[in-house]
């Protein structure tokens, strides 16, 4: 690890020792993995129960099982996420702009709303929608996702505005733009481009949060998995779990890759100067939203 | 409204359970997250790979699936835990550790290499460099995001409601069943108790964040 | 019509659950009755539904024997058959029924907000719920019971539950009952009853408590693991939930149920579903309150 603040650059002898130690530790870890998998095989976790994906019991076809998971389950997950994301974004934009207002009452209210939404679990918001407002499960899930993520995205936009050099605002004012025009024409376009990777990773969070829908009875991917093992019997939980996990990881890894690629593109095009990066690191060091469910 | 007052003892039980889950898994996540971070900056490549893999899986798996793993899948692999708080704490810890790790790692990375070089140039040993120069600076950048991670953890304890733990959210749902006309009040009560934890913590994070920015 | 035929296959398969013979024809052909909207009083819920040719029915999607949905998306079970019976009386064919999943916690809300026309979902009639919605029926009376491991000797009834872990479902009547009447028992709740089974097998909980009919389904699936102990300690009349105050509709459903008791459609529905595990009971007396 050259360039680390923790170590001096290693010499040839240290490098040799490190390589050997690395291989030994690696082998130990592989052995641990093999031992765990062997234990799973011994308990029959890789036996005929996997036939649920090729030749399922109870008169269902393999196509039915796959369709229920990939088309219906994952489809419902994506439908909730794809509807909630733009709505959350619009609401976030409104909240973030109101927060910059010169009128104390307006900015104070916006801040209060953001704090309230940020402080309450997504699940509770979904329960509110379901039990208090009488929404359908789908609407309740979308409502929870929109409100919660709007607050997080509003914070991301605020951090972006704070990270933008002050000269941008001053330049805008200098050429005679109003404050609102400066925000709309000068600041926000830059902030949004700057924050695109954060926004994409927030979309991953939103997608993961949609799995809470299973508690309110929205038939998304996780609930579909649950309905499947309720139908087939609980010994099928393991294979269904593994496939469900793989589907979530597949989609989320793909999105994370997109975020990384966008990030690099921006850096390469000089849209993200080094100095700005440091500032955003401080303002939103790990991207607060990334830590949700 | 009266029923909310009547239900206060139940709210309190739920609140203390939520607080218990948050505090215990918070402390454990800080420990394991830091260990994971040392994996990720370790000179050993295999440890770095393991650290990165665990973190990536942790960050891309829904918490609900992590819960299902520890509550249902692990027992079917032969490792039986008592139900309730124990698997909930483990699931929350495993999940949160990934985020703690990222916060700590970006904190370490935020310290300029020149700082360590300067420390060595004036004759400090590697332990002194770490404890006197690198860590104090890293800690300052790490604390606000860590508080955010812990706030998220507090909210995430609500997922345990689906897995045999009667914490705040589960209490609220039970009360909504027992007092159908007062659903809104019951849920508002639950929200209030979450805010009692999250708003002061958020304010604290904001305060520290501002101090850090100015001291730069 | 492909959808329908796979539905029948699934139904037959579930019917064959405990029988080794697979050629069993557990099919229940509930042909829509030959009625038109004009046959119902103008402006009534029946006329509206018959006119639209479709009805939205809330049911459980994860309740063995009563309402269970397989990967092909077709619900099966006794509640589902009752729902089809009512739809048929309104002249609505099976593919005119829109099935919506209701979980224990949201049934009243869904009825009040008009997201479903009726709820047939192992829905216990009780006075608290009657303040929010109205009930037709009951069409069956279940009772809460206990499921334990076959090697269990200490638990013989609800009074032995002190200090024991009892598993049930979030927000359900049985869970509330254990909480209120047996406070010494340690209640553990999950999202679905299926989730209680592995913990019971592994010894993480000592009993699973819900209505006897649901438990019977699990005993039928794993007779070597589980048994039901003790008498029924509650009475759970299953009703059909509908909008409060819609008395005409309630009377219509009650009439439909009684007609089905008479001509054997009720018994056929039972035998094709829950009847594979349980004896066919006497139909419950409809309560026209």
Image (cartoon, coloured by chain):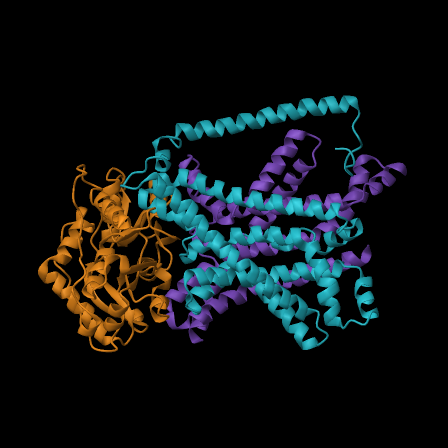
Could you say which quadrant of the image residue B41 lies in? top right
Image check: C28 left or right of A249?
left
For the point 15% across and 58% down, which residue is it?
A: C266
Q: Which residue lies furthest to the front in this view?
A: C1
Residue C205 in the image: state x and y as whole percent.
36, 46
Q: Which of A215 and B35 is in front in this view?
A: A215
Q: Residue furthest left?
A: C262
Q: Nearer the viewer, residue C101 or A74?
A: A74
Q: Is residue A167 above or below residue B123?
A: below
Could you say which quadrant of the image residue A67 lies in? top left
Quadrant location, the N terminus of chain B: bottom left
Residue B164 in the image: state x and y as whole percent.
42, 51
* Tint of chain A: cyan
Q: Nearer the viewer, residue C160 or B87?
A: B87
For the point 34% across and 31% down, which residue is it?
A: A48
* Tint of chain C: orange
Residue C284 in the image: state x and y as whole percent.
15, 62
The answer to whether residue C195 is visible is: no
The answer to whether residue A73 is visible is: yes
Image check: A159 left or right of A70?
right
* Tint of chain B: purple
For the point 39% across and 32% down, which residue is it?
A: A45
For the point 51% across and 61% down, which residue is it?
A: A144
């Amino acid at each position: 690890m050259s360039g680390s603040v923790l170590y001096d650059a290693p010499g040839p002898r240290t490098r040799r020792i490190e390589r050997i130690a690395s291989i030994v530790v690696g082998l130990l870890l592989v052995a641990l993995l093999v031992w765990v998998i062997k234990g799973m095989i011994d308990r029959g976790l890789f036996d005929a129960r996997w036939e649920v994906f090729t030749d399922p019991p109870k008169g269902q076809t393999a196509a039915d099982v796959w369709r229920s998971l990939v088309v219906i389950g994952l489809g419902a997950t994506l439908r909730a996420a794809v509807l909630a994301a733009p709505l959350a974004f619009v609401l976030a934009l409104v909240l973030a702009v109101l927060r910059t207002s010169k009128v104390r009452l307006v900015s104070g209210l916006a801040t209060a709303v953001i704090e309230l939404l940020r402080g309450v679990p997504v699940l509770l918001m979904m329960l509110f929608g379901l039990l208090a407002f009488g929404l359908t499960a789908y609407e309740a899930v979308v409502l929870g996702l929109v409100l919660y993520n709007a607050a997080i995205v509003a914070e991301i936009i605020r951090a972006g505005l704070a990270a933008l050099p002050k000269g941008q605002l001053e330049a805008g004012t200098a050429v005679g733009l109003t404050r609102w025009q400066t925000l709309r024409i000068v600041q926000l376009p830059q902030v949004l481009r700057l924050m695109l990777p954060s926004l994409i990773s927030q979309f991953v969070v939103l997608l993961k949060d949609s799995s809470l829908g299973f508690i309110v009875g929205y038939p998304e991917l996780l609930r579909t998995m649950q309905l499947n093992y309720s139908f087939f019997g609980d010994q099928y939980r393991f294979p269904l779990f593994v496939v469900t996990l793989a589907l979530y990881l597949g989609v989320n890894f793909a999105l994370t890759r997109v975020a990384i690629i966008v990030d690099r593109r921006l850096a390469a095009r000089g849209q993200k100067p080094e100095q700005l990066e440091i500032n955003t690191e401080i303002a939103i060091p790990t991207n607060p939203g990334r830590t949700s469910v | 409204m009266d029923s909310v007052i009547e239900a206060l003892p139940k709210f309190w039980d739920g609140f203390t359970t939520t607080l218990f889950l948050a505090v215990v898994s918070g402390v454990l996540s800080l420990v394991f997250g830091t260990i994971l971070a040392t994996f990720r900056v370790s000179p050993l490549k295999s440890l770095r790979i393991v650290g990165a893999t665990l973190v990536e899986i942790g960050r891309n798996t829904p918490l609900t699936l992590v819960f299902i793993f520890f509550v249902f899948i692990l027992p079917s692999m032969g490792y039986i835990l008592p139900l309730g708080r124990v698997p909930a704490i483990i699931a929350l810890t495993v999940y949160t550790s990934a985020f703690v790790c990222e916060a700590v790692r970006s904190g370490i990375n935020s310290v300029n290499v020149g700082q360590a070089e300067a420390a060595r140039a004036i004759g400090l040993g590697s332990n002194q460099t770490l404890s006197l120069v690198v860590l104090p600076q890293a800690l300052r950048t790490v604390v606000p995001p860590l508080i955010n991670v812990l706030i998220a953890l507090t909210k995430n304890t609500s997922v345990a409601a689906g897995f045999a733990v009667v914490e705040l959210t589960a209490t609220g749902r039970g009360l909504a069943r027992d007092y159908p006309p007062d659903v809104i009040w019951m849920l508002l009560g639950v929200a209030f108790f979450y805010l009692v934890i999250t708003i002061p913590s958020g304010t604290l994070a904001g305060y520290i964040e501002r101090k850090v920015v100015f001291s730069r | 019509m492909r959808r329908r035929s796979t539905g029948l296959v699934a139904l037959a398969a579930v019917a064959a659950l405990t029988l080794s013979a697979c050629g069993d024809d557990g099919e229940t052909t509930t042909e829509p009755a030959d009625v038109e909207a004009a046959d119902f009083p103008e402006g009534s819920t029946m006329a509206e539904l018959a006119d639209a040719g479709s009805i939205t029915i809330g049911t459980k999607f994860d309740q063995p024997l009563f309402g269970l949905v397989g990967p092909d998306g077709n619900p099966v079970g006794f509640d589902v058959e009752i729902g089809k019976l009512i739809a048929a009386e309104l002249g609505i064919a099976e593919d005119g029924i829109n099935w919506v999943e209701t979980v224990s916690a949201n049934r009243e809300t869904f009825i009040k907000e008009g997201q479903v026309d009726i709820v047939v979902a192992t829905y216990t009639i009780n006075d608290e719920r009657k303040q929010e919605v109205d009930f037709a029926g009951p069409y069956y009376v279940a009772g809460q019971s206990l499921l334990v491991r076959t090697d269990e000797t200490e638990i013989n009834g609800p009074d032995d539950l002190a200090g024991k872990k009892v598993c049930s479902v979030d927000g359900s009547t049985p869970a509330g009952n254990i909480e209120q009447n047996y406070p010494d028992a340690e209640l553990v709740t999950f999202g679905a009853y299926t989730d209680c089974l592995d913990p019971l097998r592994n010894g993480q909980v000592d009993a699973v408590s819900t209505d006897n009919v649901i438990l019977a389904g699990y005993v039928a699936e794993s007779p070597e693991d589980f048994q039901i102990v003790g008498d029924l300690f509650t009475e759970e009349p299953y009703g059909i939930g509908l909008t409060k105050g819609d008395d005409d509709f309630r009377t219509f459903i009650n009439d439909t149920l009684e007609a089905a008791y008479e001509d054997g459609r009720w018994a056929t529905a039972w035998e094709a579903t829950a009847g594979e595990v349980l004896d066919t009971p006497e139909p419950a007396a409809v309560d026209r309150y």
